[in-house]
Amino acid sequence: MDISYILNELGEDRSKYFNAIAPPIIQSSNFAFDTVANMRKALTNEFDATLYSRGQNPTLDILRKKLAALDGAEDALVFASGVAAISIPVLAVLNQGDHVVCVENPYSWTIKMFNNLLPKFGITTTFVDGKDVANFEAAISPETKLIYLESPNTFSYELQDLKAVADLAKSKGIITMIDNSYCSPLYQQPAKLGIDLVAQSATKYIGGHSDVVAGVVTGSKEIINRIFENEFMNIGAALSPHSAWLLIRGLRTLPLRLQRSFESTQKVTYWLQQHPAVDKVIWPFNTDFPQAELAKKQMQGCGGLFSFTLKNSSLEKIENFCNKLQHILMAVSWGGHESLIIPGIAGIPSEDYRADNHRHQLIRMYVGLEEADYLINDLEQALCPLTP
């Protein structure tokens, strides 16, 4: 299916809303029926019916169709946050006594879900170095029901061989799920490599303007329906019609924004690699990235998120550099129009800083839609006092 058709036409029957170019926001909590028979039909199959906006809504339906098609999946569900798009499907596919194999160093709230939430339901997790598929195989037990991936992850950018892991899981009847937020559907299609469930924070590239919080998961109609009928409807992390409309709007320009961010990231990372105050730049499409070959094999492009370290790094140096930036904003998240930075030390008390902890040395940057030279000039003035 052509991407231009997906982004601009799929799911949009303009004849139903006065031939308006932009779809309507159906800001209604519930929907009426003309007969008891029609209402009964909706009540017995909310997955395919417009009854109550906790379940389905016409504006959300447009968004779901587009997101499923972008991933090459049969169906999609949208949620009120990216975390909900991860935790609700995970809860839906697991039962008491089940076991999960998860990659090391996923998103922080994903770690908390596996370490703190799931044990309340008698579910255990083994974390493995996902760079070698043999580590997944070694961790699998008879109770393993889910392999959870994040490729690349969003601070040190380790990759997993998605096809190899999917093939392993299918041979043992295990469900696979990935957080694909880093790449978006345009730069990586895990479903085409055999992954069962593909989640992402739609807050990031899909929304693209830092004005909406949302999540999405795509998969087969059978598994999406399974998630919808139980955990989705009971937990109730419903996305609002207005938020769905913002995401539809964001999709219109997704290819342009991703391309701009990708091209600017190439320039910024190259410049940082040459700077005398910078020790290392970590970005999957850099030629010196340890898994560069795998990145080029399974990714069609690279997100604008990367990390770097300073030479002779210290807590004081990292803080002084970040505090001196004038235009690159210090904030969490990414994928919007604005460039952002966050040091690894921001998530720990200063007294816990360790010079030998690689994670503590990392500075993560997201390259937004500004001119690359504008960002480089800001980095230059902040790095200048640190230059040997």
Image (spheres, helix red, strand yellow):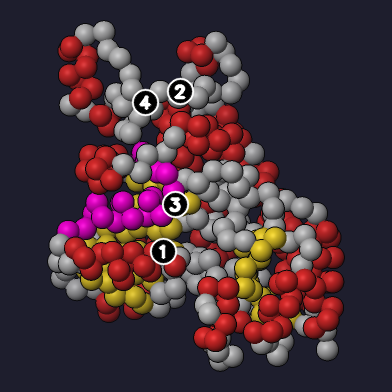
The answer to whether residue 110 is visible is: yes
**Segment colored magenta:** 73-95
Q: Residue 82 carries which label?
A: 3
Q: In this view, does 263 lie to the left or right of 189?
A: right
Measure the alpha-carbon separation of dots 3 and 1: 10 Å
Q: Residue 26 carries which label?
A: 2
Is the residue marked by circle 2 packed among few (<14), some (14-19), or many (20+) residues within 10 Å? some
Looking at this view, is 103 or 327 the one in front? Answer: 327
Quadrant of residue 356 in the image? bottom right
Say what amino acid the circle numbered 3 marks.
Gly
Return the disc, 3 or 2, that comes first in the chain's sequence: 2
Question: Is residue 112 covered in magenta?
Answer: no
x then y, percent, for residue 95: 17, 59
Residue at the image point whose x is 73% and y is 78% from the top: 320
Residue 162 location (% of width, % of height)? 41, 63
Question: Quadrant location of residue 235?
Answer: top left
- Which circle marks residue 29 in the picture? 4
